[in-house]
Image: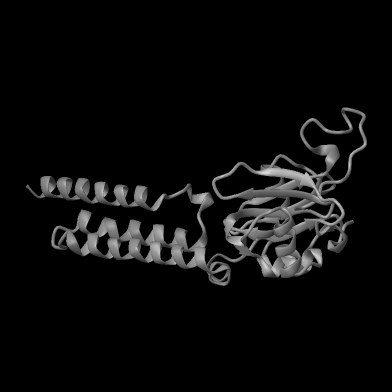
């Protein structure tokens, strides 16, 4: 009888936890943000207690899990509304390789070694720092790599074509908000961005899902519920104010 009880309790809790994970839109472990990973581990531990301990009421496992799910939605909501809050909980992407090579200061801040960087590069399909223009350690622990033009798929060197070096796009607007901390990277002001939108006949920053510009003048612009567009800056479109390499 006890075995049958454990079976049904386990099945019930499993279904509840599975439903909640689906509701939370859980990603793979390697794609989770820090607070999501911690939440997942705690939920897993809480769920196992009433499964194996018949003396523990099922609700004593389900209620704490429900509370944590509500906390997850609350933190996710705050993160979507405040970039400062999101950075506090998730951190921010850090450039570990730039055109000058490996950034040792960044590695110390991340508590990483050179071997860790090489391992992450190999996982991304690169075996030499010379192949990489930029490498960014994301908040989920994954390394994003922007290869040099000569080592990108279908390389310019294979086609015997000279090509400009790749540039990292700088996000100026994300989900209807101007990224204030990124304005100084391109040496522009909030007013410059608003003037740029006005010339593109965009009434409000809130209408923009994403706006990125790199130092070569390449623009990615997508408004909500519309297809994105890419184009090169021309004179009069914030062109003369951006630090172009």
Relative side of 178 to 54, left or right: right
Q: Pinpoint residue 33: horizontal percent, then vertical percent.
A: 52, 58
Q: Pinpoint residue 75: horizontal percent, then vertical percent.
A: 44, 66
Point 18% across, 59% down: residue: 53
Point 28% across, 57% down: residue: 47
| In the depicted structure, whether residue 154 falls above or below residue 45 | above
Relative side of 128 to 75, left or right: right
| Residue 162 picture quarter | top right
Residue 35 shows up from this direction? yes
Relative side of 83 to 136, left or right: left
Point 15% across, 62% down: residue: 57
Numbered disc total? 0
Q: Pinpoint residue 98: horizontal percent, then vertical percent.
A: 81, 56
| Residue 230 picture quarter | top right
Relative side of 40 to 168, left or right: left
| In the depicted structure, whether residue 239 falls above or below residue 226 | below
Considering every residue shown, the one lying at the far left of the view is 1
Q: Nearer the viewer, residue 138 or 204?
A: 204
Residue 113 shows up from this direction? no
Q: Nearer the viewer, residue 60 or 93?
A: 93
Considering every residue shown, the one lying at the far top of the view is 159
Q: What scheme was used to colour the molecule? A: one colour
Q: Nearer the viewer, residue 223 or 168?
A: 223
Q: Which part of the image, by quadrant, shows the C terminus?
A: bottom right
Point 86% across, 38% down: residue: 150
Q: Pinpoint residue 202: horizontal percent, then vertical percent.
A: 65, 55
């Amino acid at each position: 009888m006890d075995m049958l009880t454990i079976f049904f309790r386990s099945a019930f809790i499993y279904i509840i936890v599975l439903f909640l994970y689906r509701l939370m839109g859980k990603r793979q472990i390697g794609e989770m943000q820090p607070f999501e990973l911690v939440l997942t581990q705690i939920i897993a531990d809480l769920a196992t207690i009433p499964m194996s301990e018949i003396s523990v009421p099922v609700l004593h496992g389900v209620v704490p899990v429900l509370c944590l799910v509500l906390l997850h939605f609350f933190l996710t909501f705050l993160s979507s509304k405040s970039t400062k809050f999101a950075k506090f909980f998730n951190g921010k992407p850090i450039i570990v390789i730039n055109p000058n090579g490996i950034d040792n200061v960044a590695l110390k801040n991340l508590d990483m070694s050179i071997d860790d960087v090489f391992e992450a590069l190999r996982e991304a399909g690169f075996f030499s720092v010379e192949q990489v223009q930029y490498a960014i350690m994301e908040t989920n622990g994954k390394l994003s790599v922007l290869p040099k033009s000569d080592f990108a798929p279908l390389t310019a060197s294979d086609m015997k074509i000279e090509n400009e070096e790749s540039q990292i796009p700088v996000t100026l607007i994300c989900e209807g908000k101007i990224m204030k901390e990124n304005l100084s990277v391109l040496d522009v002001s909030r007013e410059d961005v608003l003037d740029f939108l006005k010339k593109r006949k965009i009434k409000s920053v809130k209408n923009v899902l994403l706006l990125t510009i790199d130092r070569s003048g390449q623009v990615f612009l997508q408004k909500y519920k519309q297809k994105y567009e890419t184009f090169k800056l021309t004179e009069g479109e914030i062109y003369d104010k951006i630090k172009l390499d």
